[in-house]
């Protein structure tokens, strides 16, 4: 029992009992503790230690299981909160747009690739390209001067969105 | 790695409920705590029970340990367990007083078989009052500083120093006498 947190006993005893008595007190304590060192107490039985460890292992198991349960409950709570927030924000967003059903159809038709699959989109791109080639070669009658540029713009937009994914 | 870092890791493992970390604490402190209980009670069976109770409490209370001296925290629990034992012993004593004859015969039997006949120190320790004996053992086995012991016992440090000095001096006189 040598380590006593490095406290300065001499200084401590001098503070309370004065320098003369301090040394005497320290000597008495040292002699008393020497007797304790010379008469060591019995050690705990190995069987006792094994029993304690087994008891701890049994009581620690439910603690661990409870911890896993707590983590699972927390994760479930977070997931539930996310779902609720998403649902609320979606309904709020739909209300805030306030679009007439006819307008929604128009919007859908402007962005066909949002719902179509990739083959459909590819076909549409090809169709527009064909139309553009017809217009440029004069195979089709041009109704307006802006038709070609509009077609090109549409093609660029479709191609851009397509590669963005 | 420093010893305190090791202990911090072990305690962190205990807080997560890892049985192997608790086992390490048992290996580290069972000897000292058992000796503490044995010197206070003078009985190996009771010391066995108290030591088991201490580690059960340790598992239950480890999450309430908020840092600081672990020894101080552990021996505070040990001291409380010993005080509970003393209280229950007093209750038992009252019950047993009603059957004094039977108690006396048991006591004689215990004297014949107990370890205390072999251990001279244990006999002399019994001559000290419980509080002084507890203070001497706490200082010797817990390795706590006087400041920590005084704080644990809720008394001025000067009182702790004087009591310990007086107690050890008397113990030496008893042993030499």
Image (spheres, coloured by chain):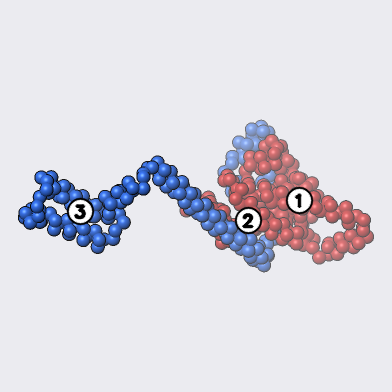
Mark 2 burial class by Cα count in 10 Å: few <14, some 14-19, many 20+:
some
- Numbered circle sitting on residue A159: 3
Q: Chain of mark 1?
A: B
* Nearest the eye: A87 or A55: A87
Label 1 and label 2 in one chain: yes
Q: Residue at x 60, y 48 (%)?
A: B65
The residue at the point 7 percent across, 56 percent down is A139
The hue used for chain B is red
Residue A58: tell me if it is visible. Answer: yes
Q: Which mark is residue B59?
A: 2
> Badge 3, how many Cα within 10 Å: few under 14, some, many 20+?
some
Q: Chain of mark 3?
A: A
Chain A drawn colour: blue
In the picture of the structure, the residue carrying the numbered disc 1 is: B84
Residue situated furthest left in the rendering: A137
Q: Is residue A35 left or right of residue A130?
A: right
The secondary element bearing badge 2 is classed as: helix
Residue B25, percent across and down? Answer: 59, 57
Residue A138 disc label: none
Q: Is residue B115 left or right of residue A153?
A: right
B45 and B164: which one is in front?
Answer: B45
């Amino acid at each position: 029992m040598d380590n006593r947190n490095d406290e300065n006993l001499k200084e401590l005893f001098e503070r309370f009992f004065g320098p003369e008595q301090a040394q005497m007190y320290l000597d008495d304590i040292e002699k008393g503790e020497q007797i304790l060192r010379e008469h060591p107490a019995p050690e705990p039985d190995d069987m006792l230690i094994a029993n304690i460890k087994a008891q701890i292992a049994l009581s620690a198991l439910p603690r661990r299981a409870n911890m896993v349960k707590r983590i699972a409950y927390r994760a479930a709570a977070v997931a539930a909160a996310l779902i609720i927030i998403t649902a609320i924000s979606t309904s709020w967003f739909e209300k805030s747009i306030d679009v007439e059903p006819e307008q929604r159809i128009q919007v859908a038709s402007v962005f066909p690739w949002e719902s179509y699959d990739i083959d459909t989109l590819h076909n549409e791109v090809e169709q527009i390209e064909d139309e553009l080639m017809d217009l440029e070669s004069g195979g089709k009658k041009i109704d307006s001067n802006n038709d070609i540029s509009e077609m090109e713009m549409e093609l660029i937009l479709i191609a851009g969105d397509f590669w963005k994914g | 790695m420093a010893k305190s870092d090791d202990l911090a890791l072990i305690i962190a493992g205990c807080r997560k409920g890892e049985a192997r970390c608790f086992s390490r604490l048992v290996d580290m402190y069972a000897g000292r705590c058992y000796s503490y209980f044995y010197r206070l009670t003078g009985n190996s069976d009771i010391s066995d029970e108290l030591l088991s109770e201490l580690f059960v409490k340790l598992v239950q209370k480890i999450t309430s340990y908020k840092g600081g001296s672990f020894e101080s925290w552990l021996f505070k629990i040990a001291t409380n367990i010993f005080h509970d034992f003393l209280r229950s012993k007093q209750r038992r004593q009252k019950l047993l007083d009603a059957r004094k004859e039977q108690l006396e015969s048991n006591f004689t039997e215990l004297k014949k078989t107990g370890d205390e006949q072999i251990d001279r120190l244990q006999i002399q320790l019994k001559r000290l009052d419980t509080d002084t004996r507890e203070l001497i053992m706490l200082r010797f086995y817990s390795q706590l500083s006087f400041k920590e012991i005084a704080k644990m016992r809720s008394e001025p440090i000067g009182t702790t120093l004087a009591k310990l000095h007086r107690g050890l001096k008397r113990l030496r006189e008893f042993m030499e006498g």
